[in-house]
């Protein structure tokens, strides 16, 4: 059981304003990975914030170049207490998305943390600086409390998660020995809702698909040629509808999972989504109505139209356009084979009378998850519920994407994600914010989980360790 004084110290760190001050210093670094000119800020954040934080934990710290020229460096902190102890791998990302300066309400500056009631506004406050600060602080509190962690620690920071984690998979493959651990515990993404402590075990993958109907270089008068010339926009609308209909149902069988596993169905049986104030209400009749909303979001695939265009919708002319394009995105769960997605969609469209539609896969982000019956999942859920006194939601994966496959597929680790944000935090938009109440509870949860890892007991033993 986590000591009462450790809980008190964790809560006092937030209540005293120390957490806010530390997060404000982090947010002040404009670490936008979408802008090459921000690499100086990213480097400063590693050198001036993260490296000292890891050093304070007794870690040896090394910075590694990215094997991918498009990506930024990696920072690794390592603390070895004893080869006989379990090894924990933590992860966070130092980069943020575009700050959207000038678009925040109340003339807020994205690089200045500002409080408005329970909401702390600032770019990176929720994604991911506030989340990795919680974990760093919880580790520091445990170290001060005990004089040791009771486990070995590896903390990996990347600097390009918001641009697809370039080079992370290659880096992990080349440094398997240095990153060897028994389990990953990390924090990113949202909880189920603002009020529910949550564990998730992986993420859906994503495939971006371009549909391009390029029929002719010129436009032609719709009165003189309407009914004679094929309209690319009309063709594209029909092609999309054959892939995903007007009610969100996927029409290409190979883009669907082979099944909804019983373990996933059972885990999601009591999960309610859109449960926080301000959340949009799920639309009735959208998607596979044979599944619950939670099953559709966390256990199934969706094909979304992200953009659709032809000619100039704001200034139309009486002409048949020559070209129309759309970007679709398949969000898919582990177990779906997407290796032939481009071919499958092209063959599907040809069979439905649309051979003139070009199909290109632009990018692909793998799906992955740790098994729901993994012993580490039971251990973590029990440890967290011991301190919360209420149920912890366990999701097979989040609906979005994270580089979880690097840890499951390349490093072979069970992955436990303990998020400290919520779905309405606006993490990629103006007005991104962290809820102070979640931060306060989050540091208690993280402290409890790390304490349980370093202090196994008869009623909460650790799962069997991985062979070296």
Image: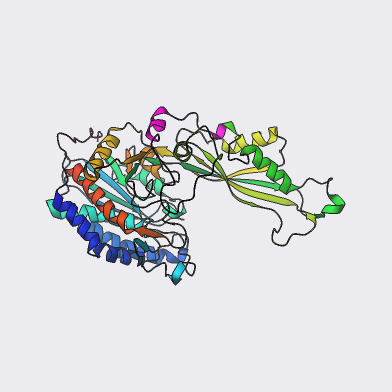
State whether residue 435 appears in this view: yes
* Residue 379 coordinates in the image, percent (x, y): 25, 36
Give the residues in magenta: 254-279
Q: Looking at the rendering, in which quadrant would you find the C terminus? A: top left
* Residue 303 coordinates in the image, percent (x, y): 56, 41
Magenta residue check for 276: yes
State whether residue 59 appears in this view: no
Q: Nearer the viewer, residue 92 or 200?
A: 200
Residue 433 in which image quadrant: bottom left
Q: Nearer the viewer, residue 364 or 295?
A: 295
Side of 351 relative to 55 (left or right) = right
Q: Residue furthest left?
A: 147
Q: Residue furthest right?
A: 224
Q: Looking at the rendering, in which quadrant would you find the N terminus? A: top left
Q: Residue at x 27, y 52 (%)?
A: 441
* Residue 422 coordinates in the image, percent (x, y): 38, 51
**Main structural element of the magenta stretch: helix, strand or loop?**
loop
């Amino acid at each position: 059981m986590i000591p009462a004084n450790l809980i008190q110290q964790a809560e006092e760190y937030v209540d005293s304003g120390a957490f806010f001050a530390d997060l404000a210093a982090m947010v002040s670094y404009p670490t936008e990975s979408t802008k090459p000119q921000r690499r100086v800020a990213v480097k400063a954040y590693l050198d001036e914030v993260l490296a000292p934080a890891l050093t304070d934990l007794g870690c040896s710290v090394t910075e590694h170049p990215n094997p991918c020229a498009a990506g930024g460096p990696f920072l690794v902190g390592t603390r070895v207490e004893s080869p006989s102890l379990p090894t924990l791998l933590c992860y966070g990302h130092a980069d943020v998305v575009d700050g959207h300066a000038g678009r925040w309400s109340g003339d807020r500056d994205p690089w200045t943390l500002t409080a408005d009631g329970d909401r702390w506004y600032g770019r990176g406050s929720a994604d991911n600086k506030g989340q990795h600060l919680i974990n760093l602080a919880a580790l520091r509190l445990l170290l001060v409390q005990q004089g040791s962690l009771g486990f070995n620690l590896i903390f990996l920071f990347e600097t390009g998660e918001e641009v697809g984690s370039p080079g992370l998979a290659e880096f992990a493959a080349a440094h398997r020995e240095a990153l060897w651990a028994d389990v990953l515990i990390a924090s990113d993404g949202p909880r189920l809702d603002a009020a529910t402590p949550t564990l998730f075990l992986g993420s859906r993958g994503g495939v971006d698909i371009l549909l391009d109907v390029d029929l002719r270089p010129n436009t032609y008068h719709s009165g003189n040629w309407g009914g004679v010339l094929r309209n690319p926009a009309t063709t594209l609308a029909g092609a999309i509808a054959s892939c995903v209909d007007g009610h969100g149902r996927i029409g290409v069988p190979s883009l669907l999972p082979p099944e909804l596993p019983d373990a996933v169905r059972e885990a999601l049986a009591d999960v309610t989504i859109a449960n926080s104030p301000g959340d949009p209400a799920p639309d009735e009749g959208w998607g596979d109505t044979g599944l619950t909303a939670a099953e559709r979001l966390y256990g199934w695939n969706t094909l979304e139209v992200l953009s659709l265009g032809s000619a100039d919708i704001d200034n139309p002319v009486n002409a048949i356009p020559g070209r129309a394009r759309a970007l679709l995105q398949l969000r898919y769960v582990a177990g779906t084979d997407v290796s032939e997605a481009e071919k499958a969609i092209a063959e599907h469209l040809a069979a439905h009378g649309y051979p003139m539609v070009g199909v290109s896969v632009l990018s692909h982000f793998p799906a992955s998850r740790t098994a729901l019956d993994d012993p580490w999942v039971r251990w973590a859920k029990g440890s967290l519920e011991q301190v919360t006194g209420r149920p912890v939601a366990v999701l097979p994966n989040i609906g979005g994407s994270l580089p979880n496959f690097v840890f499951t597929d390349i490093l072979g680790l069970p992955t436990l994600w303990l998020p400290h944000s919520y779905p309405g935090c606006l993490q990629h938009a103006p007005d991104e914010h962290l809820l102070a109440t979640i931060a306060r509870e989050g540091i208690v949860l993280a402290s409890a989980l790390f304490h349980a890892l370093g202090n196994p007991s008869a009623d909460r033993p650790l799962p069997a360790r991985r062979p070296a």
